[in-house]
Image (spheres, rainbow, N blue to C red):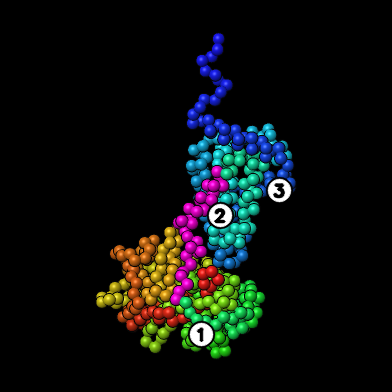
Amino acid sequence: MSPDVDLTVPEPGGHSLRARLLGLDARLFEFAAARHWPYGQRVLPRLSHSANHGVLWFATAAAIAASRTPRGRRAAARGLASLALASATINTLGKRSVRRPRPLLDPVPAVRHLKRQPVTTSFPSGHSASAAAFAAGVAMESPGWGAVVAPVAFSVAMSRIYTGAHFPTDVLAGAALGVGAAFAVRGMAPTRAQLVPPARPRAEVPALPDGEGLVLVANTAAGTADRVRALRAALPGAEVVECEPQEVPGELEKAAARARVLGVCGGDGTVNAAAGAALRHSLPLAVLPGGTLNHFAQDIGVEDVGALGRAVRGGEAVRVDVGRFGCGSRHGVFLNTCSLGVYPELVRERDRWSGRIGNWPAGVLAVLRVLRTDRHPLEARVGGGSRPLWLLFAGNGTYHRMGLVPGRRLDLADGQLDVRVVHGGRRPAPRLLAAALAGPLTRSPAHAAVTVPRLRLTDVSPGTLLAYDGEVTEVAGEVTLEKLPEALTVYRPLPGS
């Protein structure tokens, strides 16, 4: 008697293609197990083990951050953020949605086996996802570091097949998920390359092929030695003057008297002093970032010696706005921000302690001390009517929030002051936090924001502190903040240079 159904032939339907793919996957796994991988036995099992719990990638991120370049630090942070998102997705959705068993180890030589076999489900590969996410995240911020990390990430992914921990499709799916996580992080926090401000308005400046005519003053307290050496190699004709912080203003004046182009290497405070000298002597300014944050250099698109060298050799520059404050006979300029209230108090507290315990611990201590205060640091008459304020912030140019990242200026010649006010209340911390999260151009009982070309404050209490680009001074009575449109010419590489 013959059966009604031939059980030796697979039923047609939706599972036929799946069965064929799984069969192909198993044959590829067995093919890889039978191949000889040069140096694989010595390297790949150890590499696979080092990537457990992301240890390899945390160590790599630390090494990249140790390069002490802003791009390196951002690349390390973006790589770790991408890794974290990929790992969270794998552990909450990936492993739970497809319960695929691990491959049988029979085809894999025993010498390749991991000492401790994984017990979770096989699809997708968490190691591959982490490797791809970290490498893609790093590459999005720094292609150079991405080229260094990519071969290691690829080897980690291949090690999962080599050791018999995963099928090839597990690795491919994990890698795809990891790259997707990196793109998701970029959507929430755009890279610097996505936020480069437009190169306008362009300015006519001298092109200095070997740097002759450039006199650059470097603040040695800002850790500028490596960058100064790189600048001398890139622009051998440039004159470099290295000096202590207290000598910077005098050296800038001397340099401006003999330079065709005034250069500066240091943090935002040093750059502020150089901008003042460049304005007084009607000179173009070349900025080489040398501090910790380097807001102005980052916003004009000059991150390193390579970018500055291209701009100086090619004679590429733009004009940018300068902010100016005045109080009686006291005047000053700011390239980034000017503020009154809690922030100047914080800067003063930080400077008081930084010499004893270091900059970062002093900053934390200053935040704790200032936010615990119950005294409003600022009483001002703004547009009629006196009221207490926790903070008045004025940015040189409009700050825009991009995703979840802090605000960036996309136009440094928009003619506007970005003014934010945090109104008085019982405690500053909740109000300042709410203002920071709300973003620009919002109004509430706690804070407000507006863009204006000029601002006048009256009845400012004597002894009130004003901070400008990290420097602090005292003001009283009437204080004016205004824009000097396109007043400063700054070297920066133009698109396509």
**Residue 80 picture location, percent across and down:** 55, 55
Q: Nearer the viewer, residue 300 or 294?
A: 300
Q: Nearer the viewer, residue 161 or 458?
A: 161
Residue 195 is one of the magenta-drawn residues: yes
* Marks 1 and 3 in Cβ contact (< 8 Å): no
Which corner quadrant of the image does residue 461 belong to?
bottom left
Q: Residue at x 60, y 58 (%)?
A: 146
Which corner quadrant of the image does residue 240 belong to?
bottom right
Answer with left or right where residue 307 lies relative to residue 113. Answer: left
| Residue holding disc 1 | 283
Considering the numbered disc 3 on the image, is that residue within a helix, a strand or a loop? Answer: helix
First of labels 1, 2 by sequence position = 2
Pick out the residue farthest to the bottom: 257
Considering the numbered disc 2 on the image, is that residue within a helix, a strand or a loop? Answer: helix
| Residue holding disc 2 | 136
Residue 490 is one of the magenta-drawn residues: no
Q: Residue at x 45, y 74 (%)?
A: 200
Q: Residue at x 64, y 35 (%)?
A: 27
First of labels 1, 3 by sequence position = 3
* Vertical position of residue 304 compared to residue 170: above or below: below
- Regarding residue 270, the answer to whether it shows in the image is no
* Vertical position of residue 174 compared to residue 470: above or below: above
Answer with left or right where residue 9 lies relative to residue 379. Answer: right
- Distance from disc 1 to disc 3, alpha carbons, whole Å, reads 57 Å
- Distance from disc 3 to disc 2, alpha carbons, whole Å, reads 23 Å
* Magenta region, residue range: 173-201
**Residue 47 picture location, percent across and down:** 66, 48
| Residue holding disc 3 | 43
**Residue 99 picture location, percent across and down:** 53, 35
Q: Nearer the viewer, mark 3 or mark 2?
A: 2
What crowding class fits label 3: few (fewer than 14 Cα within 10 Å), some (14-19), or many (20 or more)? few
Q: Residue at x 49, y 29 (%)?
A: 13
